[in-house]
Image (cartoon, helix red, strand yellow):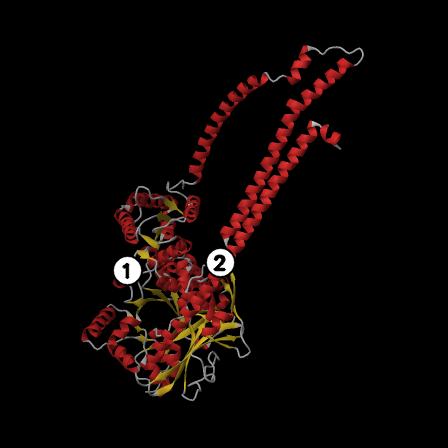
Amino acid sequence: MRRLFEEVSISTLSAAFIVVVALLVAGMGAHMWVELQNASASIRAREAAAGRKEISQATHALAQRMRDISANLAGWDETRQQLVFDEYYTLWRDVRLKDARIVPSGVVAAALYHKGGDILIPDREGRMPARLPAAPPILVHARESGHDYLYSYFPVHADPDRAVLLGYGAIKFDFLAEMRTVQSFRYTDISTLSVAVPGTGLVPLENLAARLKFSIKANPDVEALHKLFLHAYGRQLLATLLVLAVAAWFTHRVLVRPLRLMSEEIKALQSAGGTLPSAERLTGPVSVLELADVRRAFNDHQRRLAEMHRNLEQSNQDFYDQARRDALSGAFNRRAFEEDWLELGQVGHCRGCNLLLFDCDHFKAINDTYGHPVGDAVIVAIAACLRQALRAGDRLYRIGGDEFATMLRDTPLRMAEAIAERCLEHILVHDFQQYGVAEPVTISIGLAHADSEEGLSELQKQADLAMYTAKRPGNRKIVVYDESIGQVSALVANREVSLVFQAIRLPQLLEFRYQPIMRLPDPVAEYVEALARIRLDGELIGPAAIFPIVQARRLDSEFDLAVIAAIRRDLDLDLPALARGVSINISAPGLLNTKVIQALEALKAAYPARKVVIEITETALITQMGPAVQHIERLRLAGCLVALDDFGSGYSSLRYLAAMPVDLVKFDISLVHQLRQEGERPRKVVEDIARMVLNAGYELVAEGIETRELLDKVTEMGFSHAQGFYFSDSHGQPPAG
């Protein structure tokens, strides 16, 4: 055995050395992997604890929110009135609660109960229990049809001292929706939240946190660290094996082979008749003098490679810059934006990070009207104006067709707003008429601010919501994101967006609430206005959720076409409500769309005997008045009447009235309700405006008629038509009295 180890060949020793080194590298990698897994498990444990804390905080916040809403509802005079005199209870429950904004939009249902526990008037849809639960807790969770709801039961007293009990009230919340409202969840996957419901089915809210089951969000940083480690370790192991293989080859060429040759030569000399080897044969294999020449040649080669490498790096840098620049505007492109945004998140240093999104208003109309070369010139000019307004170190990115963005790091919110104002001023003073654009070119700016790296994840979404808010008619052109914008923008959640797209693709999902429009002075239903809704799986989605999505996604014309198709369907079904005619609301982009105009002409041609009124909302901005007037004339020539809707609620009422050849003018509900004010001045203003419009030869429609007194006033003023809740249940005739 000793002799065996003494006579081991150098080839065997080299192979053994390679195996030992490979095993050491593998062992080190395995040890590091175990340590990484332990660290990951510790992180997940902390995240689970943080998630439980998030849930606990959210339930406490939710409980306080429900108490506050319940207190407001219990203290409302109209709540006490319904418990004493319940004649208008259904109207109070279904309309007044929403109009008065005593309860938020997230409340699913509400009800009032007698002191004995019975509901005042049963809910036909069964949304609220007919009786209060025995000894009801104040706040309770319930599972209904597989969905989680929260109930708040509260007493209603007649006096501030809470001595005289009138009855009880109850409000019902969507549990998951309210959880999302009261708190943002960093660790908890809110979509996995579920409640372990006991046999009674009711869980007091103070015990709810202990019964909640949920999953923790996947940590992308930990997963990325795992992948990074595996890739790095694989490269390290491959490099080590490659080095060992090269070392084995080099050892064989420099030591093993020359030594073997020398051994063979020595054996040859020892054999009988052997001859001495030639000098060339002896010196060639074992000599290393040529290494100097090889080294010099290698150095020369290395210098040439270095020069080539520098040239390649310069070429790569040039290509890198070209790949991250927008060829048209010269601004950085979306790829550069995403890389810089990722770098900002990885650095994790944010003492005041701001994201500004810029969007050109009505750019599609400019492009379609004046052509792409003019549109390109407008984009180039906007980019130049924004670069001039930004600071020297700020980068401008073009992230879409007419959308730009910039990131302002370590910048207070007030300074970011000042920079946004400067950007807006540069656009306003720029002469766009030099490119052939007649109307003014404006931009909408959304600004989102974060004081710490925790807020960076939502910054893009917040800036996007602020920008779309700025684009809405009547809003300021620079909007800074706040929580109120987030609450309103909850209407554009993924589910509602999907419903709108489905309704555009399948108009049969659209339903209409047909509201009668009455001919005065003797109220008789002349035609009806079609108010669009979307129904899916038994649920009816109203306009408050539909139209913000349509406007934000720029689906106005597509939605108008779907509405026209659905009304054509109801006309084909010969619905009684449509026997005399129908009024259809058309958006400003739809008025400029040839397909929409053709669809309306075809609808009127199919039903020539029925009145078809096209309502154009006055609150929408019509930038191309010439084409709009041409389309209106086409509709009137086809036999349609055209009405200017929401007159008095926007910023261009008289301009539209003077420029567009309409037949009817619909006074907005806010203008009509001025007639109920106690002061003389509001009523006189409305009367003078109505007299001016009547003298100009237009028919007047009063919206929002809710009482007989208001109906008598507009009739006396000379209004030709009226509509509102006062006529909703009378089928065309006003109620008695």
Query: Does the CB distance between marks 2 and 1 fall below 8 Å?
Result: no
The amino acid pointed to by label 2 is Arg
Q: Position of residue 726 (x, y in %)?
A: 35, 80
Camera-nearest residue between 92 and 632 = 92
Q: Nearer the viewer, mark 2 or mark 1?
A: 2
Residue 64, placed above or below residue 654: below
To which residue does mark 1 refer? 659
Q: Residues within 10 Å of mark 1 (few under 14, many from 20)?
A: few
Q: Which mark is residue 394?
A: none
Q: Position of residue 456 (x, y in %)?
A: 40, 53
Image quadrant in which the N terminus is located: top right
Camera-nearest residue between 672 and 639 = 672
The amino acid pointed to by label 1 is Ala
Distance of label 2 from label 1 (alpha carbons): 66 Å
Which corner quadrant of the image does residue 490 belong to?
bottom left
Q: Is residue 85 visible?
A: no
User: Among all residues in the image, which is located at the extreme right?
Assistant: 272
Q: Upstream in the sequence, badge 2 or badge 1? A: 2
Camera-nearest residue between 216 and 338 = 216
Q: Is residue 200 visible?
A: yes
To which residue does mark 2 refer? 46
Q: Position of residue 620 (x, y in %)?
A: 33, 61
Image quadrant in which the C terminus is located: bottom left
Q: Is residue 680 left or right of residue 701?
A: left
Q: Position of residue 310 (x, y in %)?
A: 46, 28
Q: Residues within 10 Å of mark 2 (few under 14, many from 20)?
A: few
Camera-nearest residue between 414 and 737 = 414
User: Among all residues in the image, which is located at the extreme front?
Assistant: 2
SS state under label 1: helix
Residue 277, placed above or below residue 63: above
Number of labels in the image equals: 2
SS state under label 2: helix
